Image (cartoon, grey):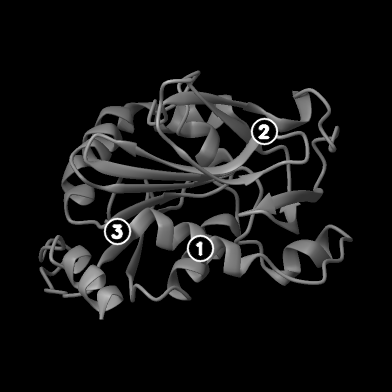
Amino acid sequence: MIAVRRVASVASRVSSWWPGRVRTTRPVALVYRGPASLPGCPEAVAALLGASRWRFDIRYVGPDEDRPVSAETLAGAALYAQPGGGTLAKGYRHLRRHRSAIREYVHGGGRYLGFCLGGYLAGATPGFDLLPGDTDQYIASSDATVESEDNTLVEVAWRGRSRMLFFQDGPYFWVRPSAAATVVATYPNGTAAALVARFGQGCVGVVGPHPEATGDWFTDAGLTVDRLGVDLGLDLVDTVMRP
């Protein structure tokens, strides 16, 4: 019953704003798809969200989609997801004009979910400055277990349990000593691989590896893994969506 009430409370934020003004009682999840992402990344995030218990009405947003990233578009959404992509410099160059709209959306009660590049973009140098701290390259951190930018696997402790996840030059996250944040997963060197923090009235969830990665990601990269990370991605979605 608690879960049902939570879903209903999120759904109540959704208005009849989509093209055609079709009213929906399902929480709208926006997934960015455009030049600041790579083929397959938005679709994997959308599949993860579609597998969640939140019954999202999932829509892609971006320069070539039905709706752009804008304050008007974000106003009707329960969640905005920023998938993986290329380099931080290139990604931010495409998205920096949306910085204010995304910050205002989350600060006013929206939810941001960032994967890999989307995690980097939640930071401040450069980025949307949504975290009570910043991000940096895991491969450049002290005692990192991965040193290459190539597609590979990385071990994380997700809520204390060891798992292997798809990884491609993802970030780690740090927070100021006085700031409040929940570290959901850590890399072997103790740095944060996934965390959730408040931003104003909203919530931000970020992850450096790719729990949303589908089986073909591993096959194409010549990697094998005993278990996909979808359950971990769903855990992050739930943590971000809870009031």
Residue under numbered circle 3 = 66
Circle 3 residues within 10 Å: few <14, some 14–19, many ≥20: few
Callout count:
3
Disc 2 versus disc 3: nearer the observer: 2
Reading the image, the residue beneath label 2 is 191
Helix, strand or loop under label 1:
helix
Q: Is residue 35 visible?
A: no
Q: Which residue is mark 1?
A: 235
137 or 162: nearer the viewer: 162
| Residue nearest the viewer, comparing 137 with 67 | 137
Q: Is residue 187 left or right of residue 15?
A: right
Q: Earlier in the sequence, mark 2 or mark 3?
A: 3
The residue located at (34%, 58%) in the rendering is 241
For badge 2, the amino acid type reads: Thr
Amino acid beneath label 3: Asp
State left or right for residue 154 relative to residue 116.
Answer: right
The residue positioned 22% from the left and 34% from the top of the image is 104
Three-letter code for the amino acid on which mark 1 is drawn:
Asp
Q: Give the percent coordinates (x, y) of residue 132.
A: 41, 26
Q: Quadrant of residue 131?
A: top left
Residue 24 can be seen in this image: yes
Q: Could you give the CA–CA distance between mark 1 and mark 2, rounded to whole angstroms? A: 19 Å
Q: Disc 2 versus disc 3: distance between alpha carbons?
A: 39 Å
Residue 234: percent from the left, percent from the top? 51, 66
Answer whether labels 3 and 1 touch (C-beta < 8 Å): no
125 or 95: which is nearer to us?
Answer: 125
- How crowded pointer 2 is (Cα within 10 Å; few <14, some 14-19, many 20+) is rated as some
> Which of the marked residues, 3 or 1, is nearer the chain's N terminus?
3
Q: Is residue 67 above or below residue 85?
A: below
